[in-house]
Image: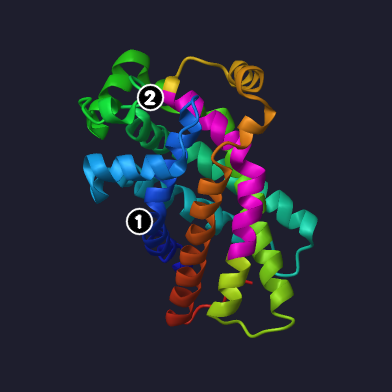
Amino acid sequence: MKELTLIPFASLLAETVTHPVDFIKTQKQYLKTPIPVVTLFTQTYKNKGVKGFYPSIVPAVIRHWVYTTTRVGLYERLRSKDSNTLNKLYSGVLAGGVAQAISSPTDLLKVKLQTQALQQSTDMHSASRIQKKSMYTIAKHIYKQQGLRGFYYGWQPNVMRAMLVNVGELVAYDNGKQYLLQYMDDTVACHGLASIHSGFWSTLMSTPADVLKTRLMADSKYTMIQCSKDIIKNEGLLSLWKGFFPNWFRLAPWQFVFWTTYEQLRKLNHLDSFT
């Protein structure tokens, strides 16, 4: 159980380092008109400075304290060290689904904070002048309008995304590390290579669900099927992978920071490596 107390520290560091990329990725997925990633970065910095990239850091960190602690802890208990890949896949899917079902409200607040200005204007200049709402104000409004169920709007693609992310992340890291250990020692270099491998697969598998999650949580007016049809009809099938590279540029370093930190914390606390 001691390792569960280490996961929040590793996830806090990973989320803080990569949150600006997550912010830009969400903007890219929400906008229906194509705006280059570079433009989103420069306009955000011009309008708000560095703090403009952290509008939702509080719910994002809280989400990972719940989500990542639950999924990593549950995965380690569901699979044994000698599990085959199929068992690991089942463990990853179940751990991700349960963890995201619990933490979905914090994800909703994060997306609302990241996209609130762009809901009123797709022009970055005018968006910067729109009055922003706090997390508390948004939460109060959701509860007043829809009650507790309002915090779970968009939970279906969110849970589906988490299942796919955990297959691509936990299983890919687990199997990747096992493969690398045949050729190298259990060091930071091994952890880093395994985390980059897991970052690519988790991004590839989860981006379509991530796009649906962003649209549903930001607008709160579609069903998942309606949203899927609308995106494919008006923007094309490949639009389901919109924001793939910002997503990868976020997930890869997130995995790297989290896993290398988590592995070292386990070592410092005289715990076995994640294997």
Q: Is residue 211 magenta?
A: yes
Is residue 21 placed above or below 154 in the rendered structure? below
Magenta: predominant secondary structure element?
helix
Q: Position of residue 178 (x, y in %)?
A: 71, 73
Quarter holding residue 17: bottom left
Residue 165 appears left or right of 220: right
Scheme of colours in the image? rainbow
Indicate the secondary structure of the residue bearing disc 2: loop
* Residue span colored magenta: 196-218
Q: Residue at x 37, y 30 (%)?
A: 115
Q: Which residue is mark 2?
A: 122
Look at 51% across and 65% down and name the residue there. 256
From this viewpoint, is residue 56 visible? no
Give coordinates of residue 181: x percent, y percent: 69, 79
Marked residue nearer the N-terminal end (1 or 2): 1
Q: Is residue 136 above or below residue 38?
A: above
Quick check: 139 above or below 37?
Answer: above
Q: As rendered, which of 167 and 227 lies closer to the eye?
A: 227
Horizontal side of residue 130 vs 21, given as left or right:
left
- In the rendered structure, does residue 40 fall within the stretch colored magenta? no
Identify which amino acid the numbered label 2 is placed on. Answer: Thr
Type of amino acid under label 1? Thr
Residue 71 image position (x, y, % from top left): 54, 52
Measured as percent of width and height from the top left, residue 119 is found at 37, 22
Which mark is in front, 1 or 2? 2
Residue 118 appears in the figure: yes
Residue receiving disc 1: 16
Of 143 and 19, the residue lying toward us = 19
Residues under labels 1 and 2: Cα distance?
Answer: 26 Å
